[in-house]
Amino acid sequence: MKNSTKVIIIEDDKDISSLIAYNLRKAGYSVEQVFDGYAAAKELRSAYFNIAIVDIMLPGLNGFDICSQIKNSDNPSRGTFVIVVSAKTSPQDKLYAHIMGADCYFAKPFSVAILLDAVNEVRDMQNREFIINQK
Amino acid sequence: MKLKLILLYVFVILISFGLTSFFLDKNLEENSLSNIQSSLISEAYLIENQISVESLKRGDVFSLDALVKILSPKIKSRITIIDKGGKVLADSERSPQDTLKMENHFSRPEINTALAGGKIGIDTRFSRTLGIDMLYIALPIKDNNQPLGVLRLALPLGDVQKTLSTIRKIVFLGLLLALGFAFVLGYIVTTRITRPINRIIQVSRKFSEGDFTHRIINHSKDEIGELSFTLNKMAQDLEDKIREIRQQNQELSAIFNSMIEGIIVVDKTSRIVSVNPAIEKIFGILNADAQGKTFLEAVRNNEISEIINNVLTQGKSLSVEVTLVLPGHRIFEVNAVPIFENDSVNGCLVVIHDITEIRRLETIRRDFVANVSHELKTPLTSIKGFVETLLEGALDDKENNRNFLKIIQNHAERLNSLVNDLLSLSYLESKNISLEINDVNLSRVADEVILGFGSQLRKKRIEVVNGLAPDILVKADEERIKQVFTNLIDNALKFNREKGAIKIYSEEFNGKIRVIVEDSGIGIPEKDIPRIFERFYRVDKARSRELGGTGLGLSIVKHIVELHGGMVGVESSEGSGSRFFFTLLK
Ligand SMILES: Nc1ncnc2c1ncn2[C@@H]1O[C@H](COP(=O)(O)OP(=O)(O)OP(=O)(O)O)[C@@H](O)[C@H]1O
Ligand SMILES: [Mg+2]
């Protein structure tokens, strides 16, 4: 059950990154993994992703910078749905992430099943919009 | 005062004496005169008996003359006999021839009284004949109630006056004496009264000048004694009060001067009354220069000036956090309180508290908590996620299941070591830590630690050289020193290259032992060196974490060494290795 939805995982912890990647791939997504802010920025400029899963505390550019880059630039990733996954759990951090462009926020440690549900829902929503746009 | 009192004395004496002597004199004069009169009258009666009516009737001048001449010296008075017509028949002071030539005496008052009224005539008069005051007594001589003539006795009053003037002299002398006495007595009495009063005046003048060391010595039971007592008590009370106030002032100014908080007192026009040394230091101004200037002139800080103005106009206290950029970045808590006098704002007291350090510590603490929670949540995320993944079916994924379990095991271990490091840190930071100081053989401890790293060293083919002399002893807690070596060698190993080298050696330095752990690894960028000993600080987080590090190792090393009274440091150049060192006491 392959689907065409592309997900980029921007997370410096390799184990967490592969945890998410493994589960998404098993669910049929095509997954790209990057491990620091600069690599993410570069990747986002060169390709379009439906969904970005972003950690906040990253080497190089941090997650907030990535969010604002995704939402404000005119690069191909502008329509990307941003899911933040972070160990930062204070209300200020959440608010700041939303202001910077995050669409939803997962606090670590998160449940893989729920994250997967969220990703699926986003995919369905985007597919519906795509169909409406086609018509 | 004194003079007044004496004069009063003299005046009283003078009045009483004057009155007494006046009445005395009058009385005496009258008394002596009437005495003389009555004795003269009785003498006159005696003489009258010896005058024969016959010779008077006849006008026998010679026999009468003889009679008066005999009697006159006996009674020491002048005797004159006059007939009923006023003609002088005999006079003791005149010869019979002269007598006849004397003028008629009928008109003389005393004679007239005697002849016309038939009564005794009395008169005091200046006698032209004799040239002195005379007392005259005229006794009518009668025969069967028919006036025949007059017997007149005259006594010079000179004696009486002499007596009187003697008495007056005595009285006057007495008066003078009394006055002199009164003067002396008055002087003594007034001095006795005024001396203590003068003393009181003197001492109370001293009181008014603020000198309370003197006391009025007067133990008498009168008003002055009481006044002295009251004044003394007042002085004592004042002295006590003043001492108390002075002491309070000293305490206050000691507090004012030694307080860490800066204090500014301004009046209601915002002019500086006083600032304390803390303010001098904070703003780099001098109290002497600042006094009298407005706050803005002296300090040039708009924000605080505004606060002061607000307090002065609104009369309500304010507490504001102010960040100062010059002379250095500092954070202050500014508390401004209005000073009231009679319900109106008369000034403002500003207390400035430097909370830079508090804020810094708060930030460190907050960062620490954030770091800890992050470091705990990261491995937890992996553990939780992979367990969930395995349960959801990955257990049957032969390709990955073992790998996932390995990851779970890794992170569990990482959590464990993190918790251990945190416990270590909190123990080292607690105040009641006690070190078990013994003579520790450094070389032996290093060998033991190196042995523990055996397999890892072999894996990376790293050679360790323990160059510590086998006889070096330091005063230290062996377990803690082991921890130091473990962390340093762990780092030297982790951040080393394949086939690298680690050298451990020591040197004497200022009477201390300096231990060096040198590696041939990746080195540390210069900008990171100052922060390398901070908790959770890692040059490359990803790499460090991959190697299982949390960034607490070096901060534990620093703590332990500093507890031993030593210091840590590092020299490094990126790419060619690092040289960590720490000092210990021999
Ligand atoms: N010998 C070394 N060579 C190069 N870098 C080093 C060396 N020792 C320490 N560092 C740097 O200093 C950082 C802090 O070291 P520290 O020992 O405190 O933490 P860690 O080793 O990452 O984790 P932990 O010691 O808690 O397991 C390291 O992450 C590393 O970047
Ligand atoms: Mg370490």
Image: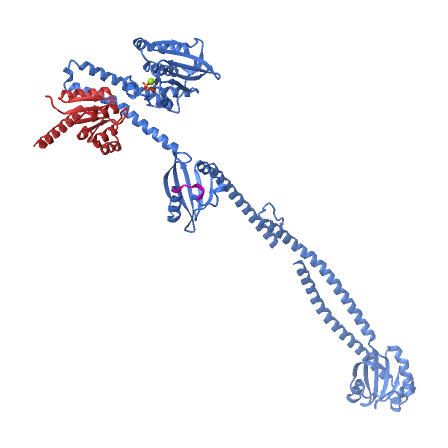
Chain colours: A red, B blue
Asked if residue B294 lies left or right of residue A85, the reply is right
Nearer to the camera, B285 or B77: B285
Residue B57 is situated, as x and y percent measured from the top left of the image, at: 87, 91
Q: Residue at x 82, y 72 (%)?
A: B162
Residue B335 image offset from top left, x and y in percent: 39, 41
Q: Nearer the viewer, residue B576 or B51?
A: B576
Q: Name the image quarter holding residue B180.
A: bottom right
Left or right: B12 with respect to B120? left
The picture quadrant where one finds residue A117 is: top left
Q: Is residue B92 above or below residue B452?
A: below
Q: Is residue B3 visible?
A: yes
Q: Does A60 sit above or below residue B410?
A: below
Q: Quadrant of ligand 2?
A: top left
B82 lies left or right of B181:
right
Q: Mainly helix, strand or loop, the magenta region?
A: helix
Q: Is residue B562 left or right of residue B377?
A: right
In reply to whether residue B298 is colored magenta, the answer given is yes
Q: Which residues are magenta?
A: B297-302
Looking at the picture, how far across and down is residue B528, in whole percent? 35, 22
Above or below for A34 versus B220: above
Q: Is residue B40 magenta?
A: no
Above or below — where is B428 with respect to B289? above
**Position of the N terminus of chain B by quadrant:** bottom right
**Could you tell me residue B439's position as x and y percent?**
44, 13
Q: Residue at x 14, y 20 (%)?
A: A26
Q: Farthest residue to the left: give it.
A: A135
Q: Nearer the viewer, residue B445 or A118?
A: A118
Residue B221 appears anywhere in the view:
no
